[in-house]
Image (spheres, rainbow, N blue to C red):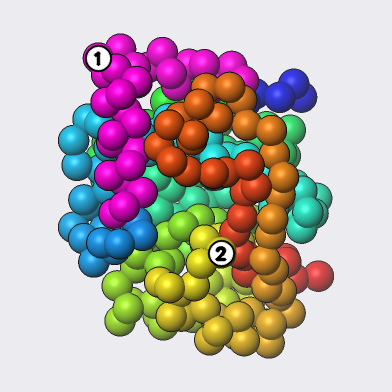
Amino acid sequence: MDDPFPAWLGALEARHRQSLSFAEVRRALQALSSLYVERRDKLGSGAALEGAGKRAAFALFFGPLHFLLLREIVRALGAAERPPRTILDLGCGTGAAGAAWAFETAGRATLEGVDRSAWAVAEARWTASRLGLRARFSTGDLVRAPLRPAPDAVLLAFTVNEVRPEARAPLLERLLAAQGDGSRVLVVEPLARRALTFWDEWSRRFAAAGGRADEWRFSVALPPALRLLDKAAGLDHRVLTGRSLYLPPPR
């Protein structure tokens, strides 16, 4: 299939720059980056998506970066081989990460997603529609999202670090059970470990279940629009980084 990324990125710009100037998006991106790095305690209240500026910055900048990173990780892991028929994206955000995986199946997978933000769910529906993917999204708590019958694949991208600490242990058990029921499970988080207090335990449990943990660094040539925004906000994403946990489907 043709690369969907350039046309989707162009449509994103047209969608989110209608009422915001470049300077407004830049300032919102700087505020959003500061929130993720320095004021993570506010993420649980939905602060990352407060206001049109932050929502535009999230959709225009982090969504495309997540798409590019997830695509590389899925390819490196071979996670689209024996293509999953359904991909459940827990904490789907704008749908970019799940869409990257679904597109790697040559569009054969149906993408399902759950997010607590109604705005994000609406944006995810637009993302899937724009990319020509079959998809269903709903507003809800990812921790309580049903995993039975087991989807072929479960994705949590930049999500577990924002889950309430007391809810992480039950979530881990449900993911391990889902793999036993036939799901492949992919967890992706930032490379920086400041907020990843759960990572060592999850890595051990995934390894014991036949999974793997990886750190990733992919050199990429960002499209001009992303490169300009990246530089203007004082960021540097010439190398996309992340870490992942992967449970392959049972043989």
Q: Nearer the viewer, residue 205 or 43?
A: 43
Please give the range of residues in magenta.
Answer: 6-35
Residue 32 horizontal/vertical position (percent): 31, 46
Q: Main secondary structure of the magenta part?
A: helix
Residue 155 sits inside the magenta stretch: no
The residue under label 1 is which amino acid type? Ser
Quadrant into which the C terminus falls: bottom right
Q: Is residue 123 visible to us here?
A: yes
Name the residue: 36% across, 49% down: 33
In which quarter of the view is residue 196 placed?
bottom left
Residue 193 horizontal/vertical position (percent): 49, 72
Q: Which mark is residue 19?
A: 1
In which quarter of the view is residue 177 placed?
bottom right
State the residue position of label 2.
191
Q: Nearer the viewer, residue 251 or 117?
A: 117
Quadrant into which the N terminus falls: top right
